[in-house]
């Protein structure tokens, strides 16, 4: 069990300047872009933590906790109306799924040991029985390191992604020391077949970041949304965005949400260039003990001023500029990335 962490669209009013260079080298390689989160004014009627979303058949399919039934599935349309989807068997907790390069589907989840006297949990995977992944086959443990005691806190929350070279990378929250707040770290495991994984050296993120979700994994252009751990900052979990050139070294996460609600467990997908639909769990800020988590929907997008355009990734930002061109007494202004005067005009 994971450790719980802490209208027309209503803009939250929080944005970030996300360095696209590796941590410790902000601004030394690549563009700086500003992102903003806008919360949608829809009531999905879904509760729980750890949602996973995929766009399929014109709706958003959402896997999310269903109490004693385990993970359940709902299809939600763009207006926010959700209907339940039948599932086959149990789907584990912290569920996520991907499509492998060969076209097959595979699910990843946290699974509790069913063997009497064995008090462990693991990050396991299983083949999806259908492309809809509303049922899974026999599960296997992804790596020996990903079997821990059921008492382990702030652990798991797997996020699987297909890398640009066709491998599968699995991001997992680990807490090497349980003695202090913000001790959570993000590790990664790599696989050629999506079944057997090997741990990669070092940490992808340190300092209490959890619940990672890779929104884009292109060569030189990776984007991730995440939350901070419970007990970090002002005690209210918030959402952050980070970027990377290779999926291994990530920029210092920058905040995109405030302290009016707890926001955690983000999941999402790209709907158009640099625009991402996201779902996340929320709870009332300041409430103690067991609380009800409500799943909300929003949009993460680049926040642009009228005079410039930035791109993500490890590439240089393209900034529009305006020049004045003259021909006799006639003046014209030209705006563009590399503006040039029309034939017969000279730059003033």
Image: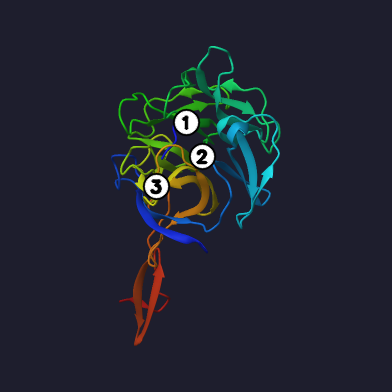
| C-alpha span from label 1 to label 2 | 9 Å
Q: Is residue 277 visible?
A: no
Say which label, 3 or 2, has the lower sequence index.
2
Q: Which residue is mark 2?
A: 49
Residue farthest toward the bottom in the current orientation of the protein: 329
Say which label, 1 or 3, has the lower sequence index.
1
**Is there a contact, CB below 8 Å, between mark 1 and mark 2?**
yes
Q: Which residue is mark 3?
A: 285
Which one is nearer the viewer's eye here, 165 or 206?
206
In the rendered view, tell whether residue 305 sits above or below residue 245. Answer: below
Residue at (58, 49) in percent of width and height:
45
| C-alpha span from label 3 to label 2 | 15 Å
Q: Is residue 126 visible?
A: yes
Residue farthest toward the top in the current orientation of the protein: 117
Residue at (53, 11) in percent of width and height:
117
Which one is nearer the viewer's eye here, 70 or 196?
70
Q: Secondary structure at mark 3?
A: loop
Nearer to us: label 1 or label 3? 3
Residue at (66, 33) in percent of width and height:
104
Q: Quadrant of residue 304?
A: bottom left
In the rendered view, tell whether residue 22 sits above or below residue 277. Answer: above
Local crowd size for mark 2, using a 10 Å CA cut-off: few (<14), some (14–19), many (≥20): many
| C-alpha span from label 1 to label 3 | 19 Å
Residue 229 is left or right of residue 9, and the answer is left
In the rendered view, tell whether residue 153 sits above or below residue 282. Answer: above
Image spot of residue 3 (x, y percent): 44, 32
Image spot of residue 107 (x, y percent): 60, 31
Image spot of residue 224 (x, y percent): 44, 43
Mark number displayed over residue 2: 1
Mark number displayed over residue 131: none
Say which label, 1 or 2, has the lower sequence index.
1
Nearer to us: label 3 or label 2? 3
């Amino acid at each position: 069990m994971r450790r719980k962490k802490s209208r027309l669209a209503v803009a939250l009013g929080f944005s970030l300047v996300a360095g696209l260079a590796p941590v410790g080298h902000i601004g030394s390689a690549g563009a700086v872009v500003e992102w903003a989160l806008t919360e949608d004014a829809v009531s999905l009627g879904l509760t729980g933590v750890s949602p996973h979303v995929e766009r399929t058949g014109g709706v958003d399919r959402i896997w999310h906790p269903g109490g004693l039934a385990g993970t359940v599935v709902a299809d939600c349309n763009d207006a926010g109306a959700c209907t339940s989807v039948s599932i086959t068997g149990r789907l584990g907790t912290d569920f996520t799924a991907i499509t492998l390069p060969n076209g097959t589907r595979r699910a990843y989840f946290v699974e509790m040991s069913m063997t009497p006297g064995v008090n462990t949990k693991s990050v396991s995977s299983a083949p999806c029985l259908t492309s809809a992944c509303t049922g899974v086959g026999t599960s296997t443990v992804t790596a020996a390191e990903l079997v821990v005691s059921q008492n382990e806190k702030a652990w798991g929350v797997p996020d699987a992604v297909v890398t640009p070279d066709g491998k599968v990378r699995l991001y997992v929250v680990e807490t090497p020391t349980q003695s202090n707040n913000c001790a959570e770290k993000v590790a990664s495991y790599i696989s050629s077949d999506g079944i057997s994984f090997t741990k990669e050296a070092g940490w992808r993120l340190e300092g209490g970041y959890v619940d990672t979700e890779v929104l884009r994994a292109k060569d030189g252009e990776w984007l991730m949304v995440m939350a901070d751990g419970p007990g970090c900052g002002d005690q209210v979990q918030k959402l952050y965005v980070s970027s990377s050139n290779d999926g291994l070294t990530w920029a210092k996460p920058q905040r995109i949400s405030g302290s009016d609600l707890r926001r955690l467990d983000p999941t999402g997908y790209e709907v158009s260039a640099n625009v991402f639909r996201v779902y996340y769990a929320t709870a009332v800020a300041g409430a103690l003990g067991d609380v009800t988590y409500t799943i909300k929907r929003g949009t993460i997008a680049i926040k642009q001023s009228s005079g410039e355009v930035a791109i993500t990734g490890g590439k240089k930002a393209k900034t529009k500029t305006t020049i004045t061109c003259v021909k006799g007494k006639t003046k014209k202004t030209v705006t563009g990335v590399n503006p040039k005067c029309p034939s017969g005009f000279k730059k003033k």
